[in-house]
Amino acid sequence: MKAILLLSLLGTLWVGSGTAFGQFSSDEEAPSDDPLAAFNASLQALKDPLAEMREAVMVDPLETLRLKQAAVEIEPVEEEPTVEVLRHVSRPSSQEPDQEDGQYLGRLSANRYAPDSTGNQFSSAGSPYSPTSVNNSYGEYGSAYSPTSARNVYATDAPKIYASDGQYLGRLSANQYDPESTANPYGRYGSQYSPTSINNPYSAYGSPYSPISPNNPYSTTAPKLFGD
């Protein structure tokens, strides 16, 4: 009798609940026993979040640079004005004086061998007998009494000196008061500190080593002398 009751109870439970022993309702799907299908389902579930991450990380570098340039305000830099320094010379450096400036008297030079040097006693410029020599004590340009002489202490029209680069170097004169005289120790052409003085041993026009200096015994491009 007990066995019959037990079987009746089990039958009731089986009919009343189809899921009691592992069966599923129509609304649910039974899990698949295929492992490959389960892996594909898991992979498909990961695709959407990975795509979102790639879109967030991958940014166009050119677009980033443009954004930075737009964000940073660049102030214009003002250039400093250039200052043009002009060297004043009485003549263009490429033009040497010629005989149109007066009587050519040779080169004022310590060179004893140059043919037109005042230091060459055998040349027309250095001979004590030449009429155009500043060394001729009886000539117009060497006499102590001539107004155009380099040896007259009162002369104001003594021979003019021009360097080979065109720079005017004053007058070859014994007058200590003439502002253009090379004998004026306070003048721009006679001071031992002036850059345009033949008496300045450190200037281009007075150094014994300068090729355009009258004090260089080997120079062949010493300053030229012109009488009025």
Image: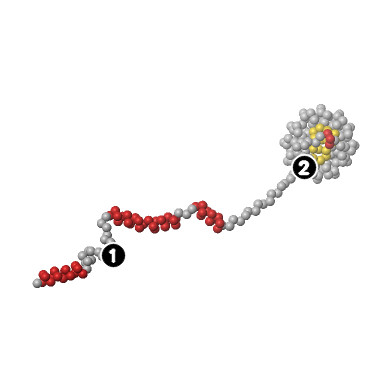
Q: In this view, does 110 lie to the left or right of 18?
A: right
Q: Quadrant of residue 171?
A: top right
Q: Residue 88: x percent and y percent?
A: 76, 44
Q: What residue type is labelled 1?
A: Asp
Q: Which residue lies furthest to the left in this view?
A: 1
Q: In the image, what residue occupies the spot 22% across and 64% down? A: 22
At horizontal 80% and vertical 30% (from top left) the residue drawn is 116
Q: What percent of the width, then of the height, locates residue 200? A: 76, 41
> Sequence-wise, which precedes: disc 1 or disc 2?
1
Quick check: 181 above or below 29?
Answer: above
Residue 172 lies, in percent from the top left, at 83, 38
The answer to whether residue 121 is above or below residue 33 is: above
Is disc 1 placed on a helix, strand or loop? loop
Q: Which of 86 and 43 is in front in this view?
A: 43
Would you name the residue on which mark 1 appears? 27
Residue 89, numbered circle:
2
Q: Which of the image's four quarters has the C terminus?
A: top right
Residue visible at 79% across and 31% down in the picture: 117
How many labels were placed on the picture? 2
The x, y position of residue 128, in whole percent, is 85, 30
Q: Residue furthest top?
A: 122
Q: Along the horizontal axis of the image, is 73 left or right of 196?
A: left
Q: What element carries label 2?
A: loop
Residue 213 drawn above or below residue 19: above
- Most foreground residue, 199 or 87: 87
Location of the N terminus by quadrant is: bottom left
